[in-house]
Structures are given as structure tokens and as C-alpha cells.
Amino acid sequence: MAELITTARPYAEAAFSFATENKQLAEWSETLNNLALIAEDIQMKKFISNPSHSDTDKVSIFESVMGSKLSDSVKNLLVALADNGRLNALPDVAKLFDQLKATSEKRIKATITSARKPTAEQKSKLSAALNTKFDAEVDIDFVVDESLISGIRIKVGDWVVENTAVTQLQKLGAAIAY
């Protein structure tokens, strides 16, 4: 997974740069997400990974499914991905593109996982703190995971803060082992 994201990053950044310059962020986002759905189909994954199919055939499938919704510039991206054997990275390209778009619009997604459901006051404080830290509007998904025993894990993109009982116990176990 991490390798595909690394592979997808330059394509997502190039697409984002082009879409920004041409004021087409929403269109590119929608198209890339549709292409990602196509690429995630089980039959399409098999087709893409089959070396007996030419790059042209692979791109043609995407073109036929997307029809007139596929601009020449997006087709060029598909051709570049196909030429480099990276069509399987399309879902990650779409995900990274949307992250870049959200950041440019000062919107960020966060996941806060805790052992118990946070109170309204706790949610409000966490939201305010994250909005200030990232200087953006942070959209938070609150998740309850009782296996954490106690504590909290906050994840915003690659940034993670974790202070849970499980983590503390793992650190203690590692310290005792040495």
C-alpha cells in the first residue's frame, strides 16, 4: 500500500498542478474518483495486471466506460500511467489528489479513535484544537474502539498522535524485554 502511494504521488501532484492552473479541480476530482472505481473492479484489476493486454487496450477500456466525460488531459494521464505500468495506482492517485485539493481549500479530514464515546464538550475542544493546529477546517470522524482500553489516537493524514493504554503497555513490554 505505502509503495503504491509513493508511486501515485507524482501523478497526483502533476494532475493537481494542471487542474489548479486550469481551474478544473472539481472536474478532475470527479473524473479521477470515477477512474479509481473502475480500476478497483475485480475484473478490471485482472485485465490491468495481465501483460498480454497492450497499454492501448487498457486505456481504451477506461475510455469506453467514461465516454465523453474523459477529457484529453485526463486521457494523457491515463496513457502515462499505462506506459509506466501504473494503472493499478489510480485509486491512490485519486485519493492523493483529493487530499491536495482539500488542503488547498483549507479542509482537512481527521480520525479520532478513543476507547469511549467522547462528550460534546470533548469533541468541541478537540475540534477547536485541531482547527487551530492545522489552520484549516478539520472534518473529524469519531470512532470508538474499546480495545484501546483508554486514551486517544488522532490521525490527520500522515500526522498521528497516540496516547492509549495499549500503546503504553506495548512500550512497557518493549522496555522490559531489553
Image (cartoon, helix red, strand yellow):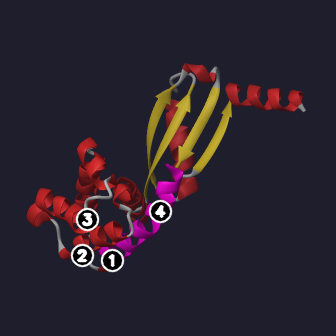
Q: Is residue 57 above or below residue 111?
A: below
Q: Position of residue 109 (x, y in %)?
A: 44, 48
Q: What is the secondary structure assignment of the residue under circle 3?
A: loop
- Judge left or right: residue 153 versus residue 171: left
Which residue is found at the position 53% from the left and 52% from the top?
A: 2
Instruction: Give the residue at mark 4.
Output: 7
Mark 1 is on which residue type?
Phe
Q: Earlier in the sequence, mark 4 or mark 1?
A: 4
Which residue is found at the position 49% from the left and 48% from the top?
A: 1
Q: What is the secondary structure assignment of the residue under circle 4?
A: helix
Whether 11 is among the magenta residues is: yes
Which residue is found at the position 16% from the left and 66% from the top?
A: 70
Q: CA distance from mark 2 to mark 1?
A: 9 Å
Mark 2 is on which residue type?
Ser
Q: CA distance from mark 4 to mark 2?
A: 20 Å
Whether 16 is among the magenta residues is: yes
